[in-house]
Amino acid sequence: MRRFAAIFSMVLLGACSTQRPGELAIDRSIHAKSQNSRVEFLVLHYTAANNQRSLKILSEHNVSSHYLITDHPQPKVYELVDESRRAWHAGVSQWFDRTDLNSASIGVEIVNPGKEDGQWAPYPQAQVDTLITLLNDIVNRHQIKPHNIIGHSDIAPQRKIDPGPLFPWATLASHGLGRWYDPSKVASYQQEFAHTGLPSIAWLQSQLTRLGYASPNSGILDKATRNVVAAFQMHYRPTLHNGQPDAQTMAIAKALITP
């Protein structure tokens, strides 16, 4: 009996010494004041596929997003990845000095075919209304700043064009969801440029960098710079997004920075 008791005691001690952290009784009743969300960015995409195909790709393939909004008459919202986990939606990306946007962002995919037969597909109003409701909830919980509500083309202008020029950035901004400019300032700067001439390409590249874009700083209007300009135009001047830095494009860039 004594030998059995000794063996039993050793077993108990061994069990205690190998207890895993997950089995501890952790007291979670006290919460530190000094903390905030790890989420800093909200990245918006179109799927370039229909509802069924989009859902299959984002749930079964080597790509994902936190949310998917369908284009049904009454759009349905799927949560495919918990917000506490990293979804694979941004890829190689940069916004300001941050790279690997997947690590600090929430990705929202919107069912939209993109460009078909030379025409961009619009976003139905019901889908936009659903998006605004979803974004308001996400932004309020994570306190995401307006300039960090961005499109895939903003963070990867050399390889992505979604959510495209018909995405309703101005409408979102009117609901406090994103950065926008003062039209009167843009008109004033356009008049200024009409008298003084357009600023240099180096100036525009610097402005785009200050706005968050990964822009070259070569002072030359090369292909990479045109891609960044086109991404900027799709977001803020979607009626003409040819990558050519005209007076209105430069005026918008200046208006977004100048208080």
Image (cartoon, rainbow, N blue to C red):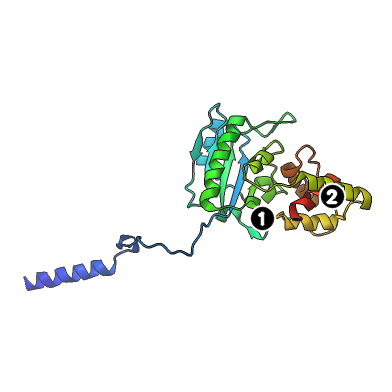
Examine the rendered structure and indicate whether residue 124 appears above or below residue 190. Answer: above
Q: In this view, does 257 lie above or below 16?
A: above
Q: Which of the pair 241/7 is nearer the observer?
A: 241
At horizontal 55% and vertical 35% (from top left) the residue drawn is 130
The tally of labels here is 2
Amino acid type of disc 1?
Answer: Trp
Report the Cα–Cα distance between label 1 and label 2: 26 Å
In the displayed structure, does residue 137 sit left or right of residue 157? left
Residue 199's x, y, as percent?
87, 54
- Image quadrant containing the N terminus: bottom left
Nearer to us in this view, 160 or 97: 97
Residue type at mark 2: give it.
Tyr
Please rate how many residues cluster around mark 2, counting C-alpha atoms within 10 Å: few if below 14, some from 14 to 19, many from 20. Answer: many
The answer to whether one can see residue 65 in this image is no
Find residue 95 and name its label.
1
245 relative position to 163: left or right: right
Extreme-top residue of the structure: 73
Residue beneath disc 2: 189
